[in-house]
Amino acid sequence: MADTTISKLTRQHRRIVTLMHGALPQRVVEMLDDTANDVLGQLAEAEATTWLEFSDKVACLVGGLPHDPTSGWLERVRDSFAADLLALPVRSAWAKSELAEAAE
């Protein structure tokens, strides 16, 4: 399987979060947190080209949702998912109509 942008970004995010759980000074943890958030932003902008990529993207982005509902992050993630869902191949007519209706 090819190493896609989404797989690179999700792997990078996992590594950063793992580092953050180590015994590090608070300043370093804050810098790592900023970097992890930047990676999530890049991931939100990346287009999933397969359902597996979409699944990985969803898991990483939903796991990275901030606690502040006013940050705009939830809307950004929702819009990213909606764009992917419309672009990914759908095999059933029912699913196509449901996705089109949800996009309206």
Image (cartoon, rainbow, N blue to C red):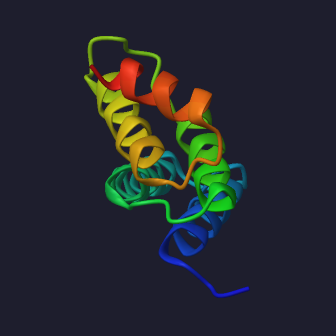
Going 31% across and 55% down the picture, which residue do you hit?
Answer: 45
Residue at the outermost front position: 93
User: Residue 88, how many percent across, how many down?
Assistant: 50, 54
Query: Which quadrant of the figure contains the N terminus?
Result: bottom right
Against 80, residue 50 (above or below) is below
Going 40% across and 60% down the picture, which residue do you hit?
Answer: 47
Frontmost residue, 91 versus 18 = 91
Left or right: 40 with respect to 17? left
Residue at the outermost top position: 69
Left or right: 46 with respect to 49? left
User: Residue 13, how many percent across, how many down?
Assistant: 57, 59
User: Residue 19, how many percent across, how many down?
Assistant: 66, 61
Going 50% across and 22% down the picture, which residue do you hit?
Answer: 98
Against 68, residue 78 (above or below) is below
Question: Could you tell me if residue 5 is visible in this image?
Answer: yes
Frontmost residue, 101 versus 13 = 101
Q: Quadrant of residue 31?
A: bottom left
Question: Could you tell me if residue 19 is visible in this image?
Answer: no
Q: Quadrant of residue 7?
A: bottom right
Q: How many marks?
A: 0
User: Residue 9, how many percent across, how many down?
Assistant: 52, 67
Query: Which quadrant of the figure contains the C terminus?
Result: top left
